[in-house]
Image (cartoon, rainbow, N blue to C red):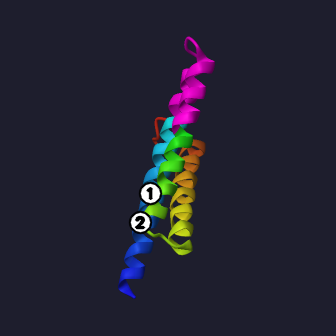
Amino acid sequence: MSAGIAAMVASVLAGAAFGALHLVLLRVATRALAGPRPGRIFVLFALLRASLLVAALAGMAALGAGAAEFIGALAGYLAARFLVIRGVRTGNGLPWR
C-alpha cells in the first residue's frame, strides 16, 4: 500500500517538474518571437517541448507505470500550470511579465 502511495507522489512531483520545464521552454520560445528568425526559434522550441513530452511518457511506460501514475503525472502538470498562470495573472512577484 505504501509503495503505491510513494509511486503516486513521485509521479505527481515528476509531472510538476516536467510541467514547469515545459512552461519555461514555452516562455523562452514566446520571448524569442521578438528576436531575429522568430519562426525558426519558435518551431525549434516546439519540437523540444514535444520531444520532452514523448520522452517523459516513454520513460514512464518503460518503468511500468500504470494508469494511476499517468493520471498523477497529469495532475502534477496541471498543478504547475495552474500555479504559474495564477502567478502571472496576479503578479505575485513572478518575473514572467
Q: Residue furthest right?
A: 39
Viewer-nearest residue: 56 or 29: 56
Q: Residue at x 46, y 35 (%)?
A: 95
Q: Residue 59: image x %, image y %?
A: 44, 57
Q: Residue at x 45, y 41 (%)?
A: 93
The amino acid marked with disc number 1 is Gly
Of helix, strand and loop, which one carries label 1?
A: helix
Write the start and end of the magenta stretch as one range.
27-48
Q: Is residue 6 left or right of residue 72?
A: left
- Answer whether labels 2 and 1 touch (C-beta < 8 Å): yes
Q: Quadrant of residue 30?
A: top right
**Residue 9 makes an appearance in the image:** yes
Label 2 sits on residue: 63
Q: Residue 44: image x %, image y %?
A: 55, 27
Q: Residue 31: image x %, image y %?
A: 55, 25
Q: Residue furthest top?
A: 36
Tag on residue 59?
1
Badge 1 crowding class, 10 Å Cα cut-off, few under 14, some 14 to 19, many 20 or more, is: few
Q: Residue at x 48, y 49 (%)?
A: 55
Q: Residue 41: image x %, image y %?
A: 55, 22
Q: Quadrant of the C terminus?
A: top right
Q: Is residue 36 a member of the stretch shown in magenta?
A: yes
The amino acid marked with disc number 2 is Leu
Badge 2 crowding class, 10 Å Cα cut-off, few under 14, some 14 to 19, many 20 or more, is: few
